[in-house]
């Protein structure tokens, strides 16, 4: 009897051990399968992340069904033949656009009818007029400009620039520059007011500096030159809310200190009164200009802007 019980116990123990082993095996196999499934999911996720990381915005938009943005080609600024800064350009110099009977021989006073005729000639013959910034970009950075380019400038800030020159500039869609003596602004009817200068600056007439008091700069000390150049620049920048980049030397007088002062204050260019066509060999602070006088015929005007 005891032997039967002992065998039964042993059999029970064996069955229990086998059951435990079976349970462990099942758990192990299930865990392995779950591990493989997790690994597969993880690999799939990583692959998706890598694909997303290398996708271009265009591919992304294709997936979303959105057309990619087309690259816009920058159109050239000018049509037709252009030139670079190995060539020269005429910077025309005017003062007044009004004939006065009391000054019949004043060659600085170009009658308004003659000025309009000259502007019409420029327009009808395909000339492009440049601002100071465009001229600077041409000389300094070699940005191309139309082959037939010209710069129009006025000195001093006479009121007739507003009443007579501005209408012609607007009529033919041209651009010009006026160099203003800031101490003269609004002092009497001969000179423009600050309101007129603002209107000029907003309608094709770039306002720039002609110093504060129109003194012969080469006769001033360095400190005096700094003062008149700085006061003019600050006055115009404050009232017109723009950067003033060009100084025109009164009566064409200047010296090494003038150029040093202009550079220190922040002017980018300096213009003389004469010398012929302007080119990069003049250097940026000694650019030449071409005088246009009251007695010039339209044929003489044409020769001046076509000279090489």
Image (spheres, rainbow, N blue to C red):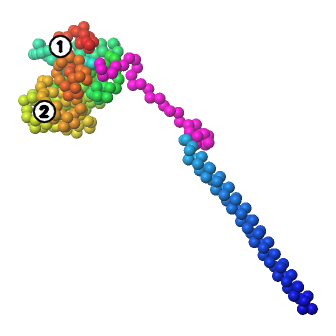
Determine the residue positioned at 16% across, 31% down: 259
Residue 87 coordinates in the image, percent (x, y): 29, 18
Determine the residue positioned at 81% across, 75% down: 18
- Find numbered disc 2 in the image and state the secondary structure of the residue it sits on: helix
Which residue matches tag 1? 294
Q: Quadrant of residue 88?
A: top left
Which residue matches tag 2? 257
Quarter of the figure that contains the C terminus: top left
Q: Which residues make up the magenta segment? A: 58-87
- Find numbered disc 1 in the image and state the secondary structure of the residue it sits on: loop
Mark earlier in primary sequence (2, 1)? 2
Query: Residue lying furthest bottom in this view?
Result: 2
Q: Nearer the viewer, residue 157 or 209?
A: 209
- The span from disc 2 to disc 1 (Cα, nearest Å) is 33 Å
Answer with left or right where residue 74 lies relative to residue 265: right
Determine the residue positioned at 34% across, 17% down: 147
Q: Nearer the viewer, residue 206 or 171?
A: 206
Q: Nearer the viewer, residue 57 or 36?
A: 36
Can the viewer see residue 293? yes
């Amino acid at each position: 009897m005891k032997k039967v019980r002992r065998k039964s116990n042993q059999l029970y123990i064996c069955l229990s051990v086998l059951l435990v082993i079976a349970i462990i095996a099942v758990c192990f196999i299930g865990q392995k399968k779950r591990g493989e499934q997790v690994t597969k999911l993880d690999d799939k996720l990583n692959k998706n992340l890598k694909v997303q990381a290398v996708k271009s915005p265009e591919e992304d938009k294709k997936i979303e069904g959105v057309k990619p943005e087309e690259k816009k080609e920058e159109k050239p600024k000018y049509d037709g033949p252009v030139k670079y800064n190995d060539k020269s350009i005429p910077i025309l110099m005017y003062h007044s656009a009004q004939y006065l009977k009391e000054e019949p021989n004043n060659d600085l006073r170009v009658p308004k009818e003659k000025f309009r005729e000259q502007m019409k000639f420029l327009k009808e013959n395909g000339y492009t007029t440049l601002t100071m910034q465009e001229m600077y970009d041409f000389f300094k950075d070699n940005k191309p400009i139309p082959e037939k380019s010209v710069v129009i400038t006025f000195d001093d800030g006479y009121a007739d620039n507003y009443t007579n020159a501005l209408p012609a500039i607007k009529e033919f869609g041209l651009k010009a520059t006026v160099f203003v003596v800031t101490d003269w602004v609004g002092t009497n009817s001969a000179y423009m007011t600050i309101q007129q200068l603002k209107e000029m600056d907003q309608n094709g007439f770039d306002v720039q500096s002609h110093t504060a008091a129109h003194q012969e700069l080469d006769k001033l000390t360095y400190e005096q030159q700094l003062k008149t150049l700085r006061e003019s620049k600050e006055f115009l920048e404050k009232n017109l809310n723009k950067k003033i980049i060009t100084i025109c030397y009164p009566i064409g007088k200047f010296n090494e200190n003038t150029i040093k002062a202009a550079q220190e204050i922040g002017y980018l260019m300096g213009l003389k009164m004469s010398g012929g066509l302007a080119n990069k060999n003049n250097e940026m602070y000694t650019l030449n200009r071409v005088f246009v006088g009251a007695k010039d015929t339209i044929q003489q005007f044409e020769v001046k802007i076509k000279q090489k």
